[in-house]
Image (cartoon, rainbow, N blue to C red):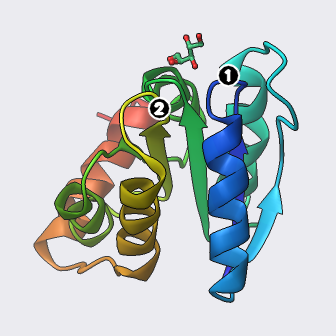
Amino acid sequence: MRIAIGSDHAGFPLKAELVERLRQDGYEVDDLGTHSTESCDYPDTARPVAEGVSQGRYRLGILICGTGIGMSMAANKVPGVRAALCSETFSARMARAHNDANVLCMGARVIGPGLAYDVARAFLESEFEGGRHQRRVDKLTALERGDA
Ligand code: RB5
């Protein structure tokens, strides 16, 4: 599975660790930056990851900042993106299964690398269940489009 990953400076060390571990697991991971701990602005990396997912270049994306909050706010501004901020595996599984989330956001100052890896794996390995959840996701899309 091809995925995109991005972070700001606060998320950079955790991103680097996750990129390595997920590649070892066989995921094709495109690292869209940032590439150092030099201060930067989270929307600048949220944008290419979210647009890449929205435009179909990546099936799923992962975004990491200090809290994950800024990244989730930024990613959810991109039409077609359903970004979920998760700090434990149950929410990560449900975000895929019930909400068809396509971007996972995490806070590097909130969770450690071991849990972040488990959360990422839970997210990447779970599938959308469809059914009644599809109707709800369709209503999210209608909200986004401003449909009546
Ligand atoms: C950077 O200091 C921090 O504000 C950022 O990483 C993120 O937590 C914002 O939501």
**Earlier-in-chain disc, 1 versus 2:** 1
Q: Is residue 50 above or below residue 136?
A: above
Task: Find disc 2 in the rendering and name its residue.
Answer: 72
Q: Seen from this angle, which residue lies furthest left?
A: 132
Picture quarter containing residue 129? Answer: bottom left
Classify residue 42 as left or right of residue 97.
right
Task: Please state if 23 lies on the left or on the right of 67 as rendered.
Answer: right
The reply to whether residue 56 is in sight is no
Does the beta carbon at disc 1 come under 8 Å from ligand 1?
yes
What residue is disc 1 on? 42
- Counting other residues with Cα less than 10 Å from the Cα at mark 1, is it few (<14), some (14-19), or many (20 or more)? many
> Which one is nearer the viewer's eye here, 106 or 77?
106
Element at label 1: helix
Q: Position of residue 142 (x, y in %)?
A: 35, 43
Measure the C-alpha gap from mark 1 to mark 2. Answer: 10 Å
The mark found on residue 113 in the picture is none
Element class at badge 2:
helix
Whether 147 is drawn above or below 124: the answer is above
Task: Inspect the image, locate mark 2, and give the three-letter code of the amino acid beneath it.
Answer: Ser
Query: Is 56 drawn above or below residue 12 in the view shown?
Result: below
Query: In the image, what residue occupies the spot 25% across and 62% down?
Result: 89
Q: Quadrant of the N terminus?
A: bottom right
Identity, as a three-letter code, of the amino acid under mark 1: Tyr
